[in-house]
Image: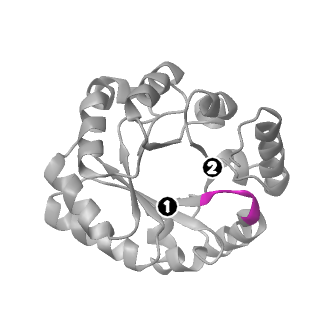
Amino acid sequence: MKESRIIASLDLVDSRQILDLAEKISNDIFAIKINWPTIMSCGIEIIKRLSKYSKVICDLKIADIPYTNEKIANIVSQQGAWGMISHIFPGEDSLKAVIKGAADSKVFGVVSMSNPDSENMLNKNWQSMIKIGKTNGVYGIVAPANNQDLLIKIRNEAGNLKIISPGSIFQGGDPLLTLENGADYVIIGRGIYESKDPVEFVNNFNELCRRNNLLNE
């Protein structure tokens, strides 16, 4: 099977529910994303448990001083996280600390968010943040699926950096259009776990990608 373009955002707080869903969809997605509420509710060991089924990206949006950032990144890396999400806006020194602590885990830097007020703060500095990310070796960046005009601009500036995009479906973004406009992977959460049949949802979306020649070989 060609590679899926879905990152399943399982931002739930019941470990049994998360693990059950992960097992069902793991063969048909690229990765699983979890956030702070998931880790705080289920315990940090949820990272290692989910890693048995899929790559795990920890959506921590790390944004502290370098000393703290390095510790956070190192802890989740040791738990088996394939990747983690960090903010870039605190500055180059803070991002370097995340990358150092992450060791072999991939770091994705946020350059824009899917909430409306990102336009007032982060979006004014996306170009500078991409430059910092490139200079310091991030694996990829986070750009919104519900702001296609900005996504296209970010794709043009990002070069070889991978782009993962939240904000589809419940936040108004079109996941298929997001891939067409340059995202490498689309992050889908409630669209999957609130659907009547998450497995069917994932398979149907993969089929749509296949029909539109959007799956990687």
Say above or below: 36 vs 128: below
Q: CA distance from mark 1 to mark 2?
A: 13 Å
* Type of amino acid under label 2: Gly
* Type of amino acid under label 1: Ile
Say above or below: 86 vs 34: above
State yes or no: residue 206 in magenta.
Answer: no
Residue 7 bears which disc, if any?
none
Residue 57 bears which disc, if any?
1
Under circle 1, the secondary element is strand
- Residue 7: image x %, image y %? 61, 52
Among numbered discs 1 and 2, the one appearing first in the sequence? 1
Residue at mark 2: 189
Quadrant of the rendering where the N terminus is positioned = bottom right
Q: Name the residue: 58% across, 27% down.
A: 181
Say above or below: 91 vs 159: below
Q: Name the residue: 62% across, 34% down.
A: 179
Q: Name the residue: 43% across, 22% down.
A: 153
- In the displayed structure, does residue 39 sit left or right of residue 110? right
- Residue 10: image x %, image y %? 60, 59
Q: Residue furthest top?
A: 149
Under circle 2, the secondary element is loop
Q: Which stretch is magenta?
A: 27-31
- Residue 191: image x %, image y %? 70, 44
Say above or below: 88 vs 33: above
